[in-house]
Every structure is written in C-alpha cells, then in structure tokens.
Amino acid sequence: MERTRHTADDVGMQILTKARTLAETTPDSRNRYVDFLRAFSILVVVFGHWLMAGPEMVAGQLRVGHLISEARWAQWATWLLQVMPIFFFVGGFSNAGSWRSAQRRGTTYATWLRDRLRRLILPVLPVLAVWTGIAAVALQTRLDRGLLTVGSQAALVPVWFLATYVLIVAVVPISLRLWDRFGWSAFAVTAAIAAAIDFANLGMGISPVKWLNYIFVWNAVHFLGYAWVDGRITSIRRSLAIAASGVASLATLVALFPYPLAMVGLDNAAVTNSNPPKVTLIALGAFQFGLTMALAPAARRWLSGIRPWTGVVAINASIMTLYLWHLTAMVGVIGAAYALDGFGLGFDVNSPTWWLTRPLFLLVLITATLPFLALFGRFERPRRDTRPTPPAWKPVVATIAVCGGLGLLARFGVADDAGLNGLALALPFFGVVVGGVVGGSTQTRSLSAAK
C-alpha cells in the first residue's frame, strides 16, 4: 500500500511538472475553454455520482439508495448537474476540427477513426480486464451473485457513455457534411426525429424504437459543437436566447408530457430521461450550450492565467482514467464497509448525519481512486500510431464490436446467475484486435489537454 501511495505521488508530480511545461508553451490560438469544459463536465459527473449515491444498511442488508429518490430538490439540481450534453457538444467542437484537419492532410477515414478509437477505447480495456478477474474469483466463492451483478453494473455505468460517444464519432463525416450543407436545419430535423421516436415509444407503445435515440438525441447535441466551431454563436445576447429557449422547452416538456423532472435515470422510475435518452436532453443541451457560450468571454480571460490553465491541463491528462475508474473505487469502498458489518453505512440518506459524513465519504473515495490513476493513467496516452492506412472495414468492425460489448456490459454487468457474460466481455477485445486498434506503435504520445 505504501509503495502504491508513493507511486501515486510520483505520477502526480510528473503530471503537474509536464502540465506546467505544456501550459507555458500553449499557443494563443488554442481554445482553452474547450479543454476546461471537458475537464469540468467529467469532474461534475464523478463527484455527482459519489455524492448522489446513498449506500446504507437496512435490516442487515445492503441497500444502495439514491439522493435523487429521497429529495425532490436534487431532481431540480440535475438540470445543471447532468452535464453529459456539455461533453457531447464539446466533442462536436473537437471532432469537427479533427476531421476537417484530417481531410486537409489527406488522411483517410479509416486512419482517422482508428486514431480516435485508440484514444477512446484503450483506456477502458484495463477496466474490463480487472472486472473479469474480480467476477471469475467471485464466482468461485460464496459471494452473492446478485451483489456481483449490481456491483459490476454500477462500476461499469461509465461505459454506456463511451459506447454512445464512439458511435457518434464514427458517423462524424456524415453528420458534419449534413451540418455544412444544412446548418441549423440539420439540428432541427434531428431533434424532430428524436421527438417522433419519443412519441412512438411513450405515446404509441412501440418500445423497441426508443433505443434509436442514442443516435439521434446525442447527434443533435453534437451539432451544437459544430455551431460553436463554425462561429455561429457570435454574441452573449444570442447565447442567452439559446439558453432561454432551451430551458423553456425543457420546462414545457416536463410540465405537459410524461417526462420526469430528474435528468438522470432512477431505478424505480417508469420513464427516465437518460436511458435511453429522450428529447428532453436536447432541450437541456441547448440550455447548457447557451449558458456556457454566454460565460465564454469571462472564462477565456480567467484561463489565460498560468495557474488555472495548468490545472486544466493536469486534470485532462488523466480525465478519462478518472471517469472510467471512479465508480470501481466507490464499489470497492462500499464493499469493504459491507464486509465490516456495514461500518459507516448506518445513516439514512439525506438525514443531517448523512450530510455531515459526506465530506469524509468523498475524501475516502478520492483516496481510493488515486491508485487507479497511478496504475492505469498511461493507457490514456497511447503511443502514436504510424502504421499504414488500414482497410476501411477494420475500424468499422472495431466500432461495432466495442460498442456492442460495452452496451451489454453497461446493461447486464460482467456476470449473472449463469456465470460470466463472456460474449459481452469478449467483444471489445475482439474488436480492438481484429479491427487493428492495438499494435504498431512507435512514438510516445505526449501529455496533452487535448482528447
């Protein structure tokens, strides 16, 4: 344990040192606000997951409650704390610039997609490997398989986003062409299709179509990033108008239609806004987009300072690792408390005592997460791939296999009563090997805030 702590300290110092160097040499042309929003949105997700979780012992049994289920004000808070829309429109900004740059250099789609997959998928493979090992050992013991299923589902919640985001990245050449030709009409039509899918699902009972909104809802939010990179948002007044229209649309949808108040999913809810995503998240995305664009001038002035910018660079250096491992750390802490007869889990969620213990709970979770950052952060910075252009089918196969496997794992966990979910676990590894995502690296990729 001591060695791991020293390793974490050493890695932390190396990251800060490199971050300071990069911060001091950052060109003035770089949009620092993009990097800040990426880091900010993931940090909100991490601390939101930690804070909203309500593990407690009830009649000698572990019950993992949720603050949002206990406090209505927390449901309102999700209008600000559900920040996945921010990550998707930031992704739109970055992906548009990346694909256009690749086209100018003559880089093929296959090479471009392979490079994006390496940076997105390689960090998740250690998570899957570790949980495969945990499940294999647990299945040979008397551990309750229900606890294993719930624990692995909780730990792998982050991969639903990754599966969706990889799909959105894979269709960037198509969505960007639509944006270049039709502009805001492309956004409006995509949002309208998402609304029609919701109507078919919620109004007509055609349930299978609801899963299509993983593509249409998040592509609509992705279009907002295209608007940003193309300079379509030119004033604070226009930004505030977009924010106002977004929040007004969201309020109308929640008030008049069967959409819940909370912008995140709840296990006991008949309808959720996030799983699968609903048109409400497009309205939320417009609200958050307009608000962040209105704050952009002040934020850019603040980020011109060396200290805040160094912090952003340092956080982005391991942001994907933090995102992927923070719930594994929480599951480990809760599991340890449960093994100690529920030590520290005897407080009712949302009670005064529960709130008083939250700072200590967060401190324990931060401490438990640091070793994961030290051990697995390097997977976030793969070596530069200088191999020749792959056949077009390879990165496409990798995308399909990885997204299929991650989607199944997010929904069902790594194991159930029948044993390991072998197919779901195998698909991502099959995809990266057969799809040529791994191998052939020759040059170390430098630490960077860019993703």
Image (cartoon, helix red, strand yellow):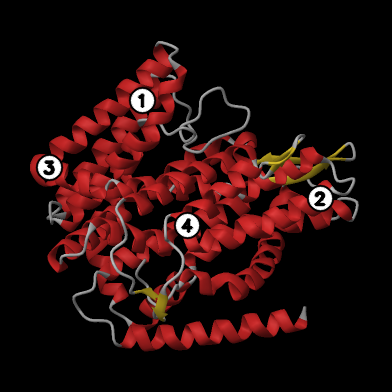
Instruction: From the viewer's perspective, tell me whether residue 129 is left or right of residue 345.
Output: left
Which element is circle 3 on? Answer: loop
CB within 8 Å, label 2 to label 4: no
Residue beneath disc 4: 432
- Spatial separation of the CA atoms under disc 4 and disc 1: 41 Å
In percent of the image, x 21 and y 49: which residue is there? 173
Q: Quadrant of the C terminus?
A: bottom left
- Spatial separation of the CA atoms under disc 3 and disc 2: 52 Å
In percent of the image, x 32 and y 81: which residue is there? 305
The residue under label 3 is which amino acid type?
A: Gly
Which element is circle 4 on? Answer: helix
The residue under label 4 is which amino acid type?
A: Val
Which element is circle 2 on? Answer: helix
Closer to the camera, 142 or 49?
Answer: 142
**First in residue order: circle 4 vs circle 1:** 1
Residue beneath disc 1: 253
CB within 8 Å, label 1 to label 3: no
**First in residue order: circle 2 vs circle 4:** 2
- Which numbered dot is residue 67? none
Image coordinates of residue 306 in percent, x first then y, are: 34, 83
Residue beneath disc 2: 138
Kindly report which numbered mark, 3 or 4, lies closer to the viewer in this rendering: 4
| Neighbour tally class for label 2: few under 14, some 14-19, many 20 plus, Cα within 10 Å | some
Kindly report which numbered mark, 1 or 2, lies closer to the viewer in this rendering: 2
- Spatial separation of the CA atoms under disc 1 and disc 3: 25 Å
Kindly report which numbered mark, 2 or 4, lies closer to the viewer in this rendering: 4
Number of dots carrying numbers: 4
Image coordinates of residue 122 in percent, x first then y, are: 49, 63
**First in residue order: circle 1 vs circle 3:** 3
In percent of the image, x 62 and y 34: which residue is there? 69
Residue beneath disc 3: 183
The residue under label 2 is which amino acid type?
A: Ala
